[in-house]
Amino acid sequence: MRYSLKAGAIEKVSTDCVVVAVYSKGTLSEEATALDKACGKIISKLVKSGDFSGKLGETQLLSGPTGIPAKRILLVGVGPKNKLASKQGLKVLNAACKALMQLKATSAHIALASLEIKDQDDAWLAARLAQQCEDNSYRYDTTKSKKAPAIALKTVTLAVATGARRKTLQDALKHGAAVGKGINKAKELGNLPGNICTPSYLAKQGNELAARNKSVTTKILTEKQMERLGMGSLLSVSAGSAEEAKLIVMQYKGAADKSKPYAIVGKGITFDTGGISLKPGAAMDEMKFDMCGAASVFGMMQAIVELKLPINVVGVVAAAENMPSGKATKPGDIVTSMSGKTIEILNTDAEGRLVLCDALSYVERFEPRSIIDIATLTGAAVATFGSVVTAMLSNDDRLAKTLLECGDSADDPAWQLPMYDEYQKQLHSNFADLANIGGPRAGTITAACFLSRFVEKQKWAHLDIAGSAWNSGAAKGATGRPVALLVEYLRRQKA
């Protein structure tokens, strides 16, 4: 989709669909008032009839209006005028974009410049508009014999208020579109079945990203190379599978070579049976989503390449399939990680931390400014937060605060859990340096405590997206989170 700015009188704009706002109780926005006057009171008559009230998120399409060149008018309800904050504003944009995607309109003009959203500016509105358009345009049909109808919308223009900073708004549109495309990339990878989206498939994605962009170089480590590096923890997860594990290392160079990078590490378990500690059969199909941490790394990388961020970033994906077989790792087995620490594997279904710990050790060679790992790691995170927020733990208070702020700013929220030393003792093992599980209590925290043992000299944060990475039920599918949070974090960093 193409995004641009357009100034001028709304009643003179030629487009397939013009979008205007109506407040609750039928109060028209400035743009809606101008259209209403030019169209013979078509909007006010609809409101007076009681067929449109202006409640938050309500939409109504008016086809073939007279007196204006626009072919359609889409009304979107914004609720009470004095209660329009960012959350409500996002619902307005989502409702409008969702409705636009159902039309045969190839162009749309969004005339919402008069909306006053508390604590937000025109740039926020522009960025969120582009992001929501991209997000709502996503359709999964890759493995369907009948493809979904193509989205007709191709061009979107945004009305510009008098005195608006055009360059700022243009940059905001570009940012929002890039984030939206990155979210869709993550959703597509997450939604693919495990027989297609294998570790080798993810490795191919990394190579293709580098082939398309001179700013990216990709290196794929094979199991033999990982074995030489001493990655016994990661390799213990793939031991029972016919699919070879891959460590995918993507380096983005947006700054000088000497500038230290920011490291983003994703868990890429392309299917998780639980291994010998086999999961129950119900809903096991959703374990194809266990690579959504990896998917968010790919989505993030795509977005920052498009935005040409002036920093260096290394994105690492630890990809493996966790299967039971005669060669699979058993409960009670002890493995040696790349760091040299030995791990007693008490539960083979706690495999995400086993691949991540070696990836975290590996990424230290880049001397990163910070390390953020993303993983669908624990059911405890789902029990605690549901699908609303991402669980976040960190060994650095400043990094944690920044990530929380970025999550709120990007409408991709996280919430910090404590990681006190007292939790570390739950990982005690009589036979190894540490166990891979910490018992039934505080599962999200002890999982992070495990990972913290491998980044003791690093500024590090862990995002547990087990609840936020995908939806179940009728809306089953990947969400693309936390791509928006990650891009916002990297956007704020300096070389």
Image: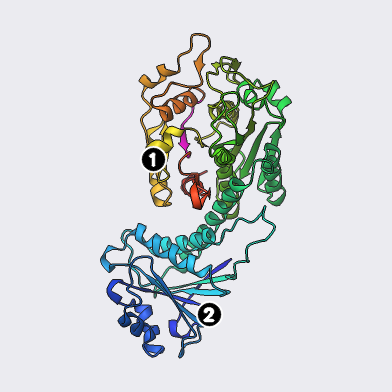
- Quadrant containing the N terminus is bottom right
Residue placed furthest toward the left: 82
The verdict on residue 462 being magenta is yes
Q: Which residue type carries mark 1?
A: Phe
**Label 1 environment density (alpha carbons within 10 Å; few <14, some 14–19, many ≥20):** some
Residue 122 falls in which quadrant of the image? Answer: bottom left
> Relative to 306, is 391 on the left or the right?
left
Decide: is 268 above or below 431: below
Q: Which residues are magenta?
A: 455-465
> Relative to 28, is 425 on the left or the right?
right
Q: Along the line of sight, which residue is nearer the eye, 376 or 49?
A: 49
Is disc 1 placed on a helix, strand or loop?
helix
**Label 2 environment density (alpha carbons within 10 Å; few <14, some 14–19, many ≥20):** many
Q: Is residue 405 visible?
A: yes
Q: CA distance from mark 2 to mark 1?
A: 43 Å
Give the mark nearest the N terminus, 2 or 1.
2
Q: Which residue type carries mark 2?
A: Thr
Percent position of residue 470, x then y: 51, 46
Q: Along the line of sight, which residue is nearer the eye, 217 or 91?
A: 91
Decide: is 224 above or below 487: above
Residue to which mark 1 is pinned = 385
The mark found on residue 301 in the picture is none
Which mark lies nearer to you, 2 or 1?
1
Percent position of residue 424, x then y: 41, 19
Q: Along the line of sight, which residue is nearer the eye, 147 or 29?
A: 147
The mark found on residue 15 in the picture is 2
Percent position of residue 59, x then y: 41, 71
Decide: is 250 above or below 156: above
What residue is at 44 percent from the left and 85 percent from the top?
A: 11
Percent position of residue 427, x then y: 45, 18
